[in-house]
Amino acid sequence: MPTDLHAAPIASAESAGPDAAGIVYVDGRFCPPSEASVSVFDHGLLYGDGVFEGIRIYGGRIFKLERHVDRMFRSAARIGLDPGVTPSQMRRILLETSARSGLREGYLRPLFTRGPGDLGLDPRKSKHPSVIVICSTINPYGGAADRGLRLIVASLRRTPPEVLHPNIKSLNYLNNVLAKAEANARGADDALLLDLRGNVAEATGENVFVVRDGRLYSPPTTTNLEGITRETIRELAAGTLPFEERSFDVPFLTSGAEAFLTGTGAEVLPVVEVDGAKVGDGVPGPITRRLRAAYFELVRSTGTPVPYPRTAHPRRG
Ligand code: PMP
């Protein structure tokens, strides 16, 4: 028998889970991240049968709380999952988890899973969906924002809408994970996924924008997630930069003046290179920098206040 992790279940259970700051809500209970667990029979784990969101807390306020909860319930409805909570209950759970975490800079990862059930992928085997909220911190690209991202084009294509609609933010992220692994193996920051026609769909967890001739372009959200950051950038650019939703290929992107990615975790990140070809001057461009600054101003000045207990000593993320 090899001496591996599974040969020492007690020791591994004691040391299981991240030491990260934060708190986790699982079906009505709050616990430290290291103690949070779900059943190995949860169909979210067994079959990826569930949906999730990613939300940020900035300065003690949850950014776009309502939009994220709405999108989560839309994702759940599209897979026929009734989470057993209402959107307003879910907003309260997110606020309470944030409050108990004490984090004023943080990241929320709510999940609805189909819940535990017998083996076999029939969703009727799961009688009680699970509602989970992880409140922790995130820093997906470290300092890459200042120098700009170097991307590759993934050899895998983005799962097409006819197979699994990218607007269902489901627990099936293997397509994205494998593209990310390919980027890692090739020494890049992230990967672009193309749709089946060869047009840019999105990055592994971000939407894509190109700046060309003073206009903003982003692919139609038939092949990628309807990003809330994407929507926010459109709103911030309105009136100064005309926006056009259109399909485009990689040469259209690399021959643009600038390109950037948007996402809740990534925020607004300049793209300076794709498969070794420079985008614009090969450095973060002025329009990207301006939109990034406007985005940070917005996230710091809006959002739903977290009701921290008066006695809590706020923690920095
Ligand atoms: N595309 C994918 C595949 C994503 O997972 C995400 C969220 N991480 C996004 C785009 C960006 O969406 P949002 O701006 O709503 O976070």
Image (cartoon, grey):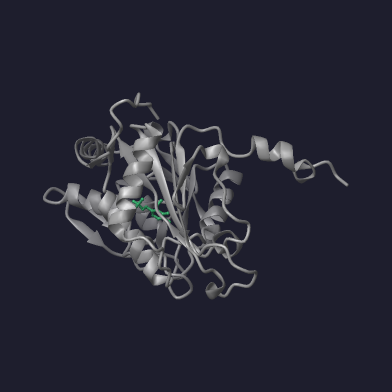
Q: Which residue is drawn at 26% across and 48% down?
A: 64
Residue placed at 61% from the left, 45% from the top?
A: 185
Task: State the residue at coordinates (63%, 72%).
Answer: 120
> Compared to 317, does 156 lie above or below?
below
- Any part of residue 267 in sight: no
Q: Is residue 88 above or below residue 34?
A: below
124 over 225 or under it: above or below: below
**Residue 198 appears in the picture as rendered:** yes
Q: How many labels does the image show?
A: 0
The quarter of the image holding the C terminus is top left
In the picture, measured across the screen, residue 221 lies left or right of residue 164, that is left
Question: Given the current orientation, which residue lies at the most extreme left position?
Answer: 239
Q: Which residue lies furthest to the right in this view?
A: 1
Q: Which residue is drawn at 28% across and 28% down?
A: 310
Where is residue 78? Give x, y as percent: 39, 71
Q: Which of 203 and 135 is in front in this view?
A: 135
Where 172 falls versus 132 (above or below)?
Answer: below
- The answer to which of 173 and 55 lies nearer the viewer is 55
Q: Where is residue 99 in the image (x, y as percent from the top left)?
A: 34, 37
